[in-house]
Image (spheres, rainbow, N blue to C red):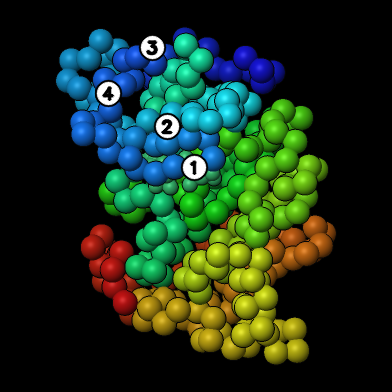
C-alpha cells in the first residue's frame, strides 16, 4: 500500500467491535449492483451505483443497501489508498462507513453504507435551525477528531457535496481521497471557492479545513450554493457588514431559520464565526476548539424547543 501510516489490523478492529472492510473480488461486486442499474451519481473518481448485500451472504455481512463507487477513467490509486486507509483506521459516528473494496483486475472499487437522502447540498434549502446547528456541530466534531490524529489528517475538501445524509438527515463526511495525512496524499487537493488556496496549491495545514468550515457555516445560514463559492464570501460581507461589523443579519440569513428557533443574536454570532473562519489570513482564523465551543453556545429559542423533540418537525419546521 502506497500510504505509509499504521492501519488497524483486522484483529485490532474486531477487538474494538468493528468489522474490517471486506475485500471483494471485483467480478462479484457487479452482482451486488441493483438491476436495472441505478446510478447514484458521478464524481472525479468514477461512477456510484446503488446495490445491496443479500441475506446469508458469504462474507457474513448484515443485509444492507450499499453504494458502489467504481473508478473510471484515470486510475486514482493515491485517492483510493487514502480513502481506504483513513476509513479503515478512523471511527466516528459522522464519518461514512466503508463496507468493503475491490482492487483486482485493474479495477478499483469502494463500497459504502448507502446514504438515503443524498448530499447536504441537495437538502440545504429544507433545513431548519436545529438541524442546521446539529450538522455544523457534527462536522466541527469530525474535523476536530481528524486534526487530533497523529499525524493530523487534513480533509482539504469540506463542502456540502461531500456531506451525505442518512434517512434521519444525520450527516456523515465522505470522500477522503483528497485528504492529507502528514506528508502522505496528493500534493494538491480541494475545490476552488470552498477550500483555501493553500489546500488547493500544495501546502495544506489544518487551517485549510477551518476556512472550509467558515464557508459551510455561511452557506448553511444563507442557504445559497453559489456555483462559484468564492462569490459567497463577498456576497455575505456586502450584505451583512457595516463598518466591518456584522449588522444586517436578516439580509443574509434565510427566513426559515429565524422562524425555526434562531434568534437574531445567534444569527449574528454565527455569521461572525463563519467570516472569522473564512478569514483570508491564516492567523485570523480561530482554533477548532473555539469553533466547537461557539457552535455549542448557539441554541434554539426556548419557546420553540418543544416542537423540535419530534424528528419530523426537527427537519421541516419553518
Ligand atoms: N454512500 C453513498 N450513498 C448514497 N449516495 C452516494 C454515496 N456516495 C456517493 N453518492 C452519490 O454519488 C455522487 C457522486 O459521489 P462522489 O463521491 O463520487 O463524487 P463527488 O463528491 O460529487 O465529486 P468529487 O469526488 O469529484 O468531489 C454523490 O454526489 C452522491 O449523490
> Within the image, what quadrant is residue 215 found in?
bottom right
Work out whether mark 2 precedes mark 4 in sequence or the reverse, and give the earlier one: 4
> Within the image, what quadrant is residue 217 found in?
bottom right
| Disc number for residue 25 | 3
Q: How many marks?
A: 4
Relative depth, front residue between 204 and 49? 49
Gap in angstroms between the C-alphas marked 4 and 3: 11 Å
Gap in angstroms between the C-alphas marked 2 and 4: 12 Å
> Within the image, what quadrant is residue 151 found in?
top right
Gap in angstroms between the C-alphas marked 1 and 2: 9 Å
Residue 67 placement, left or right of 242: left
Work out whether mark 3 precedes mark 2 in sequence or the reverse, and give the earlier one: 3
Q: Quadrant of ligand 1?
A: top left
| Cβ at disc 1 under 8 Å from ligand 1 | yes
Gap in angstroms between the C-alphas marked 3 and 2: 14 Å
Give the residue number, with chain letter if any, for mark 1: 43
Circles 1 and 2 in contact, beta carbons < 8 Å: yes
Gap in angstroms between the C-alphas marked 1 and 4: 21 Å
Relative depth, front residue between 215 and 293? 215
Give the residue number, with chain letter if any, for mark 4: 32
Residue neighbourhood size for the residue with mark 4, other residues' Cα within 10 Å, grouped as few (<14), some (14–19), many (≥20): some
Gap in angstroms between the C-alphas marked 3 and 1: 23 Å
| Disc number for residue 69 | 2
Amino acid at each position: 500500500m502506497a500510504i505509509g501510516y499504521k492501519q488497524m489490523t483486522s484483529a485490532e478492529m474486531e477487538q474494538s467491535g468493528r468489522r474490517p472492510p471486506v475485500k471483494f473480488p471485483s467480478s462479484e461486486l457487479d452482482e451486488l449492483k441493483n438491476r436495472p442499474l441505478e446510478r447514484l451519481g458521478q464524481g472525479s473518481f468514477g461512477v456510484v451505483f446503488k446495490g445491496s448485500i443479500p441475506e446469508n451472504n458469504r462474507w457474513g455481512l448484515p443485509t444492507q443497501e450499499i453504494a458502489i463507487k467504481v473508478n473510471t477513467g484515470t486510475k486514482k490509486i493515491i485517492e483510493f489508498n487514502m480513502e481506504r486507509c483513513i476509513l479503515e483506521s478512523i471511527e466516528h459516528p459522522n464519518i461514512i462507513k466503508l463496507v468493503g473494496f475491490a482492487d483486482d483486475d485493474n479495477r478499483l472499487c469502494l463500497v459504502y453504507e448507502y446514504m438515503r437522502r443524498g448530499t447536504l447540498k441537495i437538502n440545504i434549502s429544507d433545513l431548519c435551525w436545529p438541524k442546521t446547528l446539529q450538522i455544523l456541530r457534527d462536522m466541527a466534531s469530525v474535523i476536530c477528531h481528524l486534526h487530533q490524529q497523529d499525524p493530523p489528517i487534513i480533509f482539504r475538501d469540506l463542502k456540502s457535496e461531500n456531506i451525505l445524509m442518512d434517512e434521519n438527515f444525520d450527516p456523515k463526511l465522505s470522500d477522503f481521497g483528497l485528504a492529507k495525512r502528514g506528508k502522505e496524499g496528493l500534493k494538491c487537493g480541494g475545490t476552488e471557492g470552498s477550500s483555501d488556496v493553500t489546500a488547493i496549491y500544495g501546502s495544506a495545514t489544518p487551517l485549510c479545513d477551518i476556512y472550509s468550515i467558515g464557508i459551510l457555516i455561511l452557506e448553511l445560514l444563507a442557504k445559497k450554493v453559489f456555483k462559484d463559492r468564492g462569490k459567497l464570501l463577498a456576497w455575505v460581507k456586502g450584505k451583512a457588514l457595516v463598518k466591518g461589523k456584522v449588522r444586517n443579519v436578516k439580509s443574509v440569513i434565510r427566513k426559515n431559520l429565524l422562524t425555526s428557533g434562531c434568534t437574531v443574536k445567534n444569527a449574528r454570532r454565527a455569521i461572525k464565526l463563519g467570516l472569522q473562519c473564512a478569514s483570508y489570513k491564516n492567523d485570523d482564523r480561530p482554533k477548532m476548539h473555539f469553533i466547537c465551543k461557539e457552535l455549542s453556545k448557539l441554541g434554539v429559542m426556548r419557546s420553540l424547543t418543544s416542537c423540535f423533540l419530534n424528528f419530523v418537525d426537527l427537519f421541516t419546521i419553518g
